[in-house]
Amino acid sequence: MATVISTTSALFLELDGKTAGPLRTAQPASLRVDKATQSTGRETVVRRSARVTLGEMAAECDLVEPGPLIDWLQAALAGDLTQRDGALVVADVNFNARRRIGFRGARLSSLTWPVLDAGGGKRPVSLALRWLVDGVDDAPSSGKVKGSIGRRKAIVASNFRVAGLPFGDDAVSAVHLPTLQVDWAQDSFSGGSLRLRLGQRRLGELAVTITSRRAEAARAWVHKLVADGSIDESDGLALQVDLLDATLKKTLASVQLTGCLLCGMDEEPLGAATADRMATLTLRFDVGGMRLTLA
């Protein structure tokens, strides 16, 4: 199925009976039917529907304010992978519901952040999430979308600061936050019956781009850190990325990153700097834990 894009319609997410907020885009689950075949002669083949499988659902939303969706993401980051029931609701521009795609047993499978870039203009912090479901109920709908619709402005991806770096907190021009990936498997027992779902969380790398004015200090820190040829847990950093308002004074949301162990440093080619753009370097970290809080 094609992605539903909010151009002439309004898209909303429901979770556990509550409106979780507006969406930028939404992707219904794809459906596949696996066929089993059986030969009954030299030429005759009997085809039987063996199993119906549903693909991932997906959505993109702006990070705006606390609510059921943020609760779900915060819980997953903390290790709580409890299944949820909910729906994608398609409404008209007056918030009259037109279609409701209910889903059962939602299991978060991915959470991706946009790049935070100090020179990136006024792009919102839009989160991309994906989830698996046990089943869907797709039907026409009517009435007004339930619950209140948030009126806060979206947080801007260029307004941020990073705390916890040992060579200065004004050193960062861009941040690639870790992606959360959840691998789901089914544990079988009792004669092969599938009973229990197991989710294993994985955090991707954190990448921090360092400005030219702090590049020398960053390189010195890295070379000192790896001077003995190894890095262990005691060398981990606790970093915090604050998302700020337009004045760069008020914190609207924070991402706490614990156990950040250096895993790489990349420099641009020497001589690549221009009059319009200074050379930078990028530090990469393995991340032990991640937490999201909103003001």
Image (cartoon, rainbow, N blue to C red):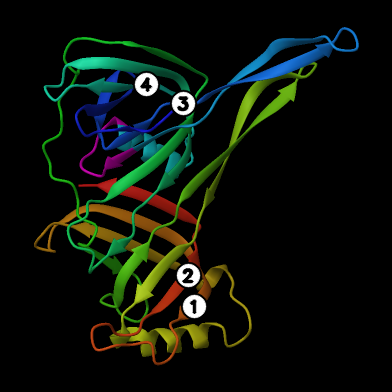
CA gap between label 3 and label 1 equals: 39 Å
The numbered dot on residue 29 is 3
Give the image location of residue 163, x and y in percent: 30, 68
Residue stretch rendered in magenta on the structure: 60-68
Number of marks: 4
**Mark 1 belongs to which amino acid?**
Met
Give the image location of residue 51, x and y in percent: 66, 16
Q: Secondary structure at mark 3?
A: loop
Mark 1 in CB contact with mark 2 (< 8 angstroms):
yes
Task: Give the labeled residue for mark 2.
Answer: 284
Q: Secondary structure at mark 2?
A: strand
* Quadrant of residue 88 within the rendered picture: top left
Which tag, 4 or 2, sits closer to the chain's start?
4
Task: Give the labeled residue for mark 4.
Answer: 86
Quarter placement of the N terminus:
top left
**Residue 169 vs residue 263: left or right?**
left
In this picture, is 212 found above or below 40?
A: below
Let me know if residue 64 is in the magenta part. yes
Q: Looking at the image, which residue is at 37% across and 73% down?
A: 209
Of tags 3 and 4, which is closer to the observer? Answer: 3
Task: Give the labeled residue for mark 1.
Answer: 265
**Residue 251 vs residue 90: left or right?**
left
